[in-house]
Image (tube, rainbow, N blue to C red):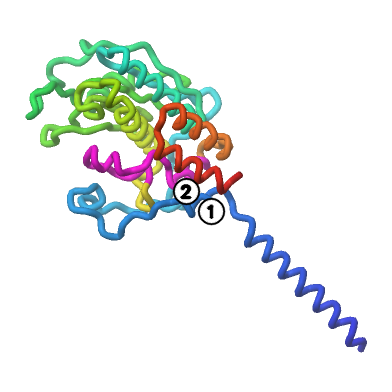
Amino acid sequence: MNRGKYNFTFLFFSVAVLLLFSCQKQKKNYYESIASNDIKLSSSPKPGSWRYNHDEHFQTFEDFQKLKRIKPEPGKNTIYLQPIGAFDELQKKEITLTKEYLKTYYQLETKILPTLPNTIFPANVKRISKEGNEQILAGYVLDSILIRRKPKDAVVLMGITEKDLFPKPEWNYVFGLASYEDGVGVTSMYRFAGGHLTHSNFNESLLRLVKISSHEIGHMFGISHCLNANCVMNGTNTLTETDYHLARACSLCQRKLNSSIHYDPKKRLLELKNFFEKQHLNTELTLANQDLNIVQ
């Protein structure tokens, strides 16, 4: 037996294995890479917060994959926005920017339909809130307005109203509501600007609108409330909680989304960065840059 021959063979095999494992360890995918930028949720949610009041199931990626869910497909891959109400110029600008944001966030064609008037709401779906403002029953918007008007090429249809919404008599209000099976949802601008949009509160209102709109559409695509990290898919009870949550989807929620909508994550990040920069949304810009620094 030539002992030297076998020693050389063993040495070559060992080096090859070490190199193989070293390469595998270095090769992280996009989601594994940006996970280091996820801001983990506190293990003890504050009283009054969504997580404190709701005992929800953690949706793993495997859970998500098993769902029968809405996905874009050829001929049915456009997001539509349906404005309903009497909008001033600032509100129209906010809707236009929301359209641009959703197109970037979901990497899907996004269009705005012609505005419907408030006269479309019958008297029996209206009420006056405890605060004295008029409210519209959110379920009526979904079932009697949006489902009937959903374009054939729409993957989802999101209504936007300047009226306050309520989901059922015992609830004070709701920011948004969606039917995930039907792919329709509605978001109210009313509370995002304290009932009156101005130049001074425009950015605050815009950020709230893009968060809630992208959150509700995320549900339509099958993503449950996020329990992984501070994320746009976190549940919310109040504007304070909405403001605390980020517009950024965490690494897990991005992985879910990208498994249904096959976009280029780096291209999406660059476009989100440009949007945040243009609108002076500095916190979200910083987060986009942090993710870009990892993947570039």
Placement of 65 over or under 202, stated as above or below: below
Q: Find the distance from the CA under tag 2 to the CA under tag 1.
A: 7 Å
Q: Secondary structure at mark 2?
A: helix
Residue 83: image x %, image y %? Answer: 32, 17
| Residue depicted at 57% across the width and 35% down the height | 267
Placement of 25 over or under 224, stated as above or below: below
- Indicate the amino acid at tag 2: Ser
Q: Is residue 271 left or right of residue 123?
A: right
Q: Quadrant of the C terminus?
A: top right
Q: According to the image, label 1 marks what residue?
A: 32
| Residue depicted at 47% across the width and 43% down the height | 254
Residue reaching furthest to the right: 2
Q: Which residues are magenta?
A: 231-259
Identify the disc placed on residue 251.
2
Placement of 35 over or under 288, stated as above or below: below
Q: Does residue 114 show up?
A: yes
